[in-house]
Image: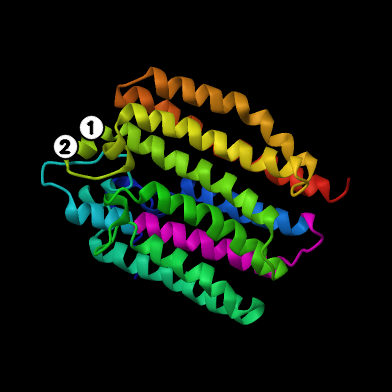
Amino acid sequence: MLIDTSQPGGRSALSIWSQAARVKSLMISSISVFSGAAVAISSGVFHWLPLLLAWTGAVAVQAGTNLTNVYFNYKGSAPDHQPEPQASAAVLSLGLLTPAQIRRAIACCFGVSVAIGVILAWMCGWTILLIGIPGALAGFFYAAPPFKLAYKAMGVITVFIFMGPVMVMGTAFAMTGAVSLAAFSVSIAAGMLAAGIMHINDVRDYQGDVLHGKCTLTTLVGPYNSRVLLAVMDTIAYSAIVGPVAAGVLPWPTLLVLASIPRAISQLRLVFRETEPKRIHPAWARSIQLHFEFGVLLIAGLLVSKWI
């Protein structure tokens, strides 16, 4: 049985599994998928079934990735390293779930994603597997050996590729059967902001990662350069929309994303000003808000352009 409803501590199984799978973070993959769908719709194409399948598959892969991270972080953590009670990894250290339950959940998530990939390939052509298979493998090996991408300074890059080109262009391709410059441009913006969330997380955890030997982009280039890199990533995200609009690749209503610039500035001011991990945490929260606001405005701009 995957979920034991008689959990310790008076918490419901749904609450515990939501913590383990980081359900709130699944909004990131949802924004990417719906951004790709909006590109397709703006070009005059809408097929609801490929969209539903793409969204379900993307969410399954992200949930599986989150659970894989929980499992292998627990297996590889030092005996004296205890995660915060609200952290996803705490579901194992506190005994709320067992490793066997997490393993079964991982198999379930990636099993669903594989099944959906096969269905999409049958519906839309086997070419889509060239996008889906690397994405699923990157999700699993994000924390799993032998690659452990997150521990080899590849975490941010993996998030960029998976949440950007893989999800956005994959969804657009599933709906239209073609790859477009518009989808590519949107994928760069979505990927950069999603990667920015992970990057701030690494900046916040810099001291702990150095202590426990975790190699991230931040431990390689240092805290200050990492802050500069975040500013560059945000700049690229906005440029990936403004440039294509100027070139006629994207419709002008997508410039709605510029309304989110104050959130980006607020995030950068905070991350450059603070050095203590606890004080950096609000910047991480603002990066999530920025990703959501930018994504919603971008989707709205693409959809509105269909009727202007």
Q: Which residue is mark 2?
A: 211
The answer to whether residue 66 is magenta is yes
Give the labeled residue for mark 1.
207
The kind of secondary structure the magenta stretch mainly shows is helix
Q: For numbered disc 2, what is the local secondary structure?
A: helix
On the image, the x and y values in percent for residue 53 come to 60, 68
Q: Which residues are magenta?
A: 42-67
Q: Amino acid at mark 2?
A: Leu
Q: Is residue 143 left or right of residue 138?
A: left
Question: Against 244, is 133 above or below?
Answer: below
User: Is residue 278 shown left or right of residue 247?
Assistant: left
- Residue 112 image position (x, y, % from top left): 48, 71
Between 165 and 51, the residue placed more toward the observer is 165
Give the left or right position of residue 252, taking residue 25 as reference. right
User: Depth check: 186 or 51 in front?
Assistant: 186
Q: Residue at x 69, y 68 (%)?
A: 178
Q: Where does the C terminus fall, quadrant-wise? A: top right
Q: Which of the pair 7/64 is nearer the observer? A: 64
Does residue 108 sit above or below 24 in this rendering? below
* Image quarter in which the N terminus is found: bottom left
Query: Would you say residue 175 sits in the magenta stretch?
Result: no
User: Are discs 2 and 1 less than 8 Å apart at CB?
Assistant: yes
| Image position, residue 275 (x, y; %) | 32, 21
Going by the numbered disc 1, the residue's amino acid type is Gln
Residue found at the far bottom of this picture: 122
> Dot 1 lies on which element?
helix
